[in-house]
């Protein structure tokens, strides 16, 4: 065995792969090590108020800067993190960064009234009771006012583990944070959850926004979502806005907020601070086809 060799060997060695065998990749261990080494960072994509024509906050999006592969997109490691449970640690890291950054944006802004930051919660986080304490602690330690934190969850999560999700969402709401449905209209939607859960915001999925002006059904569905949200007292955010035509149409439909490459790709927190503080005049006009000149 490895012990008798007097060296620490992996189980793969014991399984008889021999000295020449390359280290077998262990993606879960890689990810845990990446977190420890500080390879995970948080990027922020501006949220633009379509009426005011300015950034009022941002969505936090985790990034993995791998030393060899470069940027590894979240879709390649979030599912693994979910499976292994590491998402609890990663999620807390993102949450803390987001609260800390947003607290700084508030301080740098001359009018922070509407300022907010949104953070994605995975299924596991929504149903794990420890998330409530993690959120409470992040707010307390950073001084961010709870109403400025919006937690994004997908509708599929609400359908999967309804009771645990409802219990936690109620506790989170009691802290004063807000809840958004991410990618609205693309999960196993049941409109019943709009009555059952304490929601504040609907994020209109990119695929609907994408079809605006090109696909009559996308127009109708987007309008229906905005109207439904309005009637329920929920704010709407359009995801993946890439053209001025889409921006225009969303504004006309009465959509509240938008994010997308038209305005900005996800950037680092300093850039958001500059946008919000108004020191970056060019960017604060929200892109080439932005609304009213600053
Ligand atoms: P999401 O929460 O729906 O985030 C929006 C995704 O769309 C982001 O991809 C963003 O970069 C991208 N995007 C923004 N504007 C545009 C646009 O105009 N066009 C196009 N084509 N794409 C746009 P990203 O950062 O790769 O994240 C992918 C997904 O990974 C997220 O979808 C979210 O579900 C998940 N994710 C990201 N960060 C976290 C995190 O910290 N925790 C958890 N649990 N999930 C995360
Ligand atoms: Mg999101
Ligand atoms: Mg989304
Ligand atoms: Mg998504």
Image (cartoon, rainbow, N blue to C red):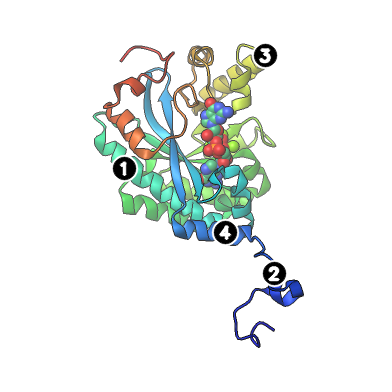
Q: Residue at x 33, y 37 (%)?
A: 270
Front residue (pair 201, 243): 243
Closer to us: mark 4 or mark 3? 4
Residue 240, image quadrant = top right
Give the mark nearer the N terminus: 2 vs 1. 2
Residue 20 - label: 2
Viewer-closest of 203 and 25: 25
- Kindly identify which numbered label has been placed on residue 30: 4
Report whether 38 appears left or right of 20.
Answer: left
Mark 1, residue position: 103
Distance from mark 1 CB to nearest ligand 1 atom below 8 Å: no
Residue 146 drawn at (x, y percent): 37, 44
Mark 2, mark 1: which one is toward the viewer?
Answer: 2
Which of labels 1 and 4 is toward the front? 4
Contact, CB < 8 Å: mark 3 with mark 2? no
Where residue 254 appears, as percent x and y from the top left, is: 49, 16
Dot 2: within a 10 Å radius of its alpha carbon, few (fewer than 14), some, or many (20 or more) residues?
few
Q: Which residue is mark 3?
A: 215
């Amino acid at each position: 065995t490895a012990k008798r060799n007097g060296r620490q060997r992996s189980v793969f060695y014991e399984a008889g792969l021999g000295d020449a065998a390359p280290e077998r990749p262990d993606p879960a261990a890689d990810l845990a090590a990446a977190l420890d080494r500080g390879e995970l960072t948080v990027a922020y994509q501006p949220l633009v108020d379509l009426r005011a024509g300015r950034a009022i906050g941002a969505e936090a999006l985790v990034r993995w800067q791998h030393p060899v592969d470069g940027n590894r997109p979240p879709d390649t490691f979030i599912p693994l993190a979910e499976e292994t449970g590491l998402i609890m640690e990663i999620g807390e890291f993102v949450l803390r960064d987001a609260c800390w950054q947003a607290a700084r944006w508030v301080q740098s802004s001359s009018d922070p009234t509407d300022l907010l930051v949104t953070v994605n919660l995975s299924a596991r986080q929504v149903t794990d009771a420890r998330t409530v304490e993690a959120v409470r602690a992040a707010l307390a330690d950073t001084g961010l006012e709870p109403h400025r934190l919006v937690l994004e969850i997908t509708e599929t999560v609400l359908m999967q583990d309804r009771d645990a999700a409802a219990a936690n969402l109620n506790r989170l709401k009691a802290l004063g944070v807000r809840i958004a449905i991410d990618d609205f209209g693309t999960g196993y939607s049941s409109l019943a959850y709009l009555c059952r859960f304490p929601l504040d915001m609907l994020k209109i999925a990119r695929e609907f926004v994408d079809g605006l002006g090109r696909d009559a059904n996308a127009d109708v569905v987007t309008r229906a979502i905005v109207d439904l949200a309005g009637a329920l007292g929920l704010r709407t955010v359009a995801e993946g806005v890439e053209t001025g035509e889409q921006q225009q149409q969303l504004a006309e439909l009465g959509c509240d907020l938008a994010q997308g490459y038209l305005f900005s790709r996800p950037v680092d927190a300093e850039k958001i601070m500059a946008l919000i503080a108004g020191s970056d005049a060019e960017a604060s006009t929200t892109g080439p086809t932005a609304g009213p000149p600053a």
